[in-house]
Image (cartoon, rainbow, N blue to C red):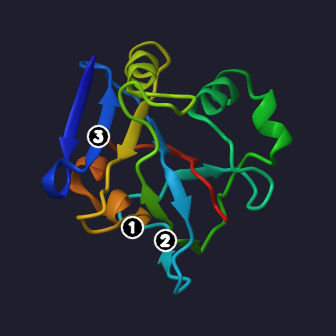
Amino acid sequence: MACDRFGMTGRMRLFYKPGAIGNRDLIISAHGGKPESGQKIDWPLPGYADTLLWCSQPGLSTTIQVSDILDYRETKKGRCLLYGFRPLPLLKSVTNYELEKFAETASDEDEDYRDYDNWAEHRGCDILSPRNRWFSKEIDLAYVLNHSKIKAKDYKNIYFSFCLS
């Protein structure tokens, strides 16, 4: 399995299956929050014309896990539907959510890096985990989506596994 660290001082980790050709799905796993200023990103960004963003309906759930998204992708039914999980194909802009670390090795959370490693290997997706710290600059959605490593992957589906409230 592979995990690339990139961004300023390696603050993002991308789990993926080495040699996998044609993987078109990315799950962004983080703690999320709206910026105080209500900043938006024009959508689609250059290079994302055919990319769909998938998320739960704001206010319905803050507990969508990567495992829920994987189940949804594979069955198109299940728990995520209860939370209004849906694609957002007609957006003209999206909130520039602030993203923080969610999982780590041996985390107390429901999911950790061992899970991400396994899921990227066996379930056909890449998983991104931001790792900002108290001493570093905030990571926001625009930073992730505009990073050359993410843009180069040409994802067709980007799933938000973070709180939208």
* Residue situated in front as seen by the camera: 145 or 119: 119
| Disc 2 + disc 1, Cβ < 8 Å | yes
Q: Amino acid at mark 2?
A: Asn
Question: Residue 52: percent from the left, percent from the top?
Answer: 57, 51
Most distant residue in the right direction: 82
Task: Give SS at disc 3.
Answer: strand
Question: Residue 127: percent from the left, percent from the top?
Answer: 42, 35
Q: To which residue does mark 1 refer?
A: 142
Q: Residue at x 51, y 70 (%)?
A: 43
Q: Is residue 22 above or below residue 53?
A: above
Question: Residue 126: percent from the left, percent from the top?
Answer: 40, 32
Q: Earlier in the sequence, mark 3 or mark 1?
A: 3
- Select label 3 or label 1 by which is in front: 3
Q: Amino acid at mark 3?
A: Arg
Question: Residue 1: percent from the left, percent from the top?
Answer: 27, 16
Describe residue 10's horizontal placement relative to residue 110 as left or right: left
Q: Amino acid at mark 1?
A: Ala
Q: Is residue 78 above or below residue 56?
A: above
Task: Give SS at disc 1.
Answer: helix
Q: To which residue does mark 2 refer?
A: 96
Q: To which residue does mark 3 refer?
A: 13
Circle 1 packing at 10 Å, graded few (<14), some (14-19), many (20+), is: some
